[in-house]
Amino acid sequence: MDSVRVLPMPLENNAKHFLVGGRVQGVGFRPFICVLANELGIRGFVRNRGGCVEIVAQSALVQIDLFLHRLLSEHPSIARPKLISAETCLPPVEPGFRILPSLEGSDAVLLPDQSMCDACLKEMLTPAARRYRYPFITCTQCGPRYTIMRDSPFDREATSMSEFPLCAECRAEYDQPLDRRFHAQVMACPNCGPTLSYRSGSSTIRGNEPALALAVSALRDGAIVAVKGIGGYHLLCDARNDALIRDLRARKRRPAKPLAVLFPRDGADGLDRLRLDCAPGEAEARALGSSERPIVLVRLRSGNRLSPALAPGLTEVGAMLPYSPLHDSLARMFDGPLVATSGNISGEPVLTAPADAEQHLQPIADAFLHHDRVILQPADDGVVRVIAGTPRNLRLGRGSAPLERALLRPLSAPVLALGGQMKTTLALGFGTRVVISPHLGDMGSPRGMELLEATADTLQRLHNVRVRTLICDAHDGYTSVRWAERRSDMRVIRVPHHHAHAAAVAGEFPMEPRWLCFTWDRVGLGGDGTLWGGEALIGQPGTWKRVATFRPFAPPGGDAASRAPWRSAAALAWDLGLDWGPPGLDVALAHDAWRARLNCPATSSVGRMFDAASAFLGLVQQASYEGEGPMAIEAIAGSSAGMEDAIALPLLSRADGVWQADWGPLVSLLLNGAWSVTRRAAAFHASLALTLVSQAITVREAHGDFAVGLTGGVFQNRCLSELALTALQEAGFRAYLPISVPCNDAGLSFGQVIEAAALAEV
Ligand SMILES: [Zn+2]
Ligand SMILES: [Zn+2]
């Protein structure tokens, strides 16, 4: 309001002006306010104002207080309102209570896509309902959000639903304050909303019922069907059909990387069908049923009916419940578990447009189930793993991103952080806000960089900010770094890889003033120009100092080592003077190169040590995807590994004051044929956990108190992280593993913003 004055008024003529921020747009908050106001006899209005909701309420003071109390306590479950201001104002000249048109502004809170709510599910299964079996049923509490936004605030005209004008019946619901679709921006019905079409060969069948029926019957016949969902295409097929899944792997050129499985929803918590094949714990069950509906890593039951080709060599599978009415219908009608893997070309972003999907997925998919609601921003499924009893995001995506975090101090100017090379996300920082994008994937392909550029524009446009500063990694080889350096109109700040990892965990738990962050990952360019990956950094954002590391080793072949665990194993063995090499590989050539130190960059990477361990144990010599070796050895170690066989690695104090752990004894442990592979795998994890704690204790003796952070892709390993967290707590440390911001390279963009802000560069 323009003026704020206190005037003597009759009791019922008091008026107050409220500004409510947080997650209040696209969540049915304005309709809820309107219904509540009518119930309490309050006059006035509500409207979107930028990213906030502005309310003017006129009544007796006691009624207004009750109204405020109830609007903050009884709001729709997906809303997260925060009262920003409450002031007395002039009473408005309003006969009743109305929703006014939105006012633009720069502070919109972007909402991730929301899974189908229970009310819509019930309605979709009610034969008499207008939207019976309608695969695009939504309301104020569910449906797509970020992936269909063209502009903000979140009004229908600013989304790709603007192409579907409401029919008279829908319009009546939209205008009716007591209807649960009152002002539902993406609502539709079979008469006015999106429609499915099924394409097989050269024929296309349009219509929700026939297209669904054809897709399900194709799936039953053993076909691979590309299905357009909320944030992109999935490839779906029968998860019990072993030959079919091997065929899918061959066609997708994805020999071993795990495939996610979609289960029909059934039973009180929806998990009855999933429990036939998987054994989710309590926290996993909660994550599976949460409104984010992520892919959750869950243990496979012995004797399950799923194809062993889904996750070769692993004991867990990525499982999810349907999140959209379309997926719910498909799973329900198919009546069994379905593989649901990203519809993309290996490593590239998920496809979103029917023509692109047909062009690129033709060699893989037998048929296509399209729809005509345009996906403006792609979003893969989010991935969650429960570690130490807490669900942790491993991938941000549909349901979990854009993810917003608050800063303690405002930035002096907006910034855009570009993340890393793989598992890339972007982070837009402005004011006290950081908005992290969904997973964009590998930047090694032109489509990856196109998506990065498009997402950079989208995040800025939807928040109405323009950046003049880019933040990126320190490694010249990263595509995003080269892209940033070409932007002559931009200032570029570079943040070393592991500093960004450490800053990300510090930024997620900002109440801790001083940290020792273990940044264990595969490799990143370190502060001294060598390849780090097994470091401990002390300090806080802006002041990191390396205080612990591992004895460096030099895998032959440089980048070739990332897909060849045997090269890391050979480097460790040869350094100890052992003669080691798996048969049938270029061992002699590699050994010559290693002796001459040709293309053998030294590294302290714990991720590479995991690779080496999986090769020593004969699990993975050549990897077909990043993480194959480490995942295989974790699966062998099992979930019940203890500290019994842990060996303490020698800690050496180097001349530069850095404590260096010697991996030497690990090699003898891994090659100890008297122990089973399982026992050796468990002892390897336990020894690394013990080393981590002894490094922390040694550093504490020299440097005093700090909180311990575990960050970097290595800590996606549940076995290692749980052993380390327990041992750290027993040694009296406050220890943290990231929860909402992934600990892997997806968290780099957030950490880059935190680090640059702390350096007072922005
Ligand atoms: Zn709903
Ligand atoms: Zn309609």
Image (cartoon, rainbow, N blue to C red):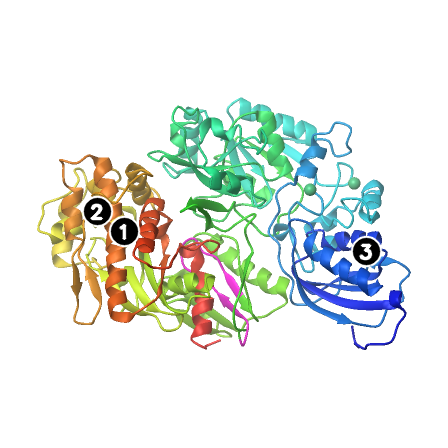
Q: How many labels does the image show?
A: 3
Mark 2 is surrounded, within 10 Å at the Cα level, by few (under 14), some (14 to 19) or many (20 or more) other residues, namely many
Q: Are discs 3 and 1 less than 8 Å apart at CB? A: no
Of residue 729 and residue 198, the one placed in the foreground of this image is 729
- Which mark, residue 646? 2
Of residue 92 and residue 566, the one placed in the foreground of this image is 92
Residue drawn at x 16%, y 71% is: 655
Q: Name which residue type carries label 2.
A: Ala
Report the span colored magenta: 412-428
Q: Name which residue type carries label 1.
A: Ala
Q: What percent of the width, then of the height, locates residue 749?
A: 46, 62
Of residue 190 and residue 400, the one placed in the foreground of this image is 400
Q: Name which residue type carries label 3.
A: Ala
Is 305 situated left or right of 128 in this image? left
Camera sees residue 311: yes
Mark 3: C-beta under 8 Å from nearest atom of ligand 1 = no
C-alpha distance separating marks 3 and 2? 64 Å
- Which mark, residue 488? none
Residue 227 within the segment the image draws in magenta: no
Whichever of labels 3 and 1 marks the residue nearer the N terminus, that label is: 3
Camera sees residue 605: no
Residue 426 within the segment the image draws in magenta: yes
Q: What residue does disc 1 label?
A: 689
Mark 3 is surrounded, within 10 Å at the Cα level, by few (under 14), some (14 to 19) or many (20 or more) other residues, namely many
User: Is disc 3 placed on a helix, strand or loop?
Assistant: helix
Q: In which quarter of the image is the N terminus?
A: bottom right
Q: What percent of the width, then of the height, locates residue 106?
A: 65, 67
**Image quadrant where residue 125 sits:** top right
Is 668 situated left or right of 142 in this image? left
**Image quadrant where residue 37 sits:** bottom right
Q: Is residue 176 above or below residue 59?
A: above
Q: What residue does disc 3 label?
A: 37
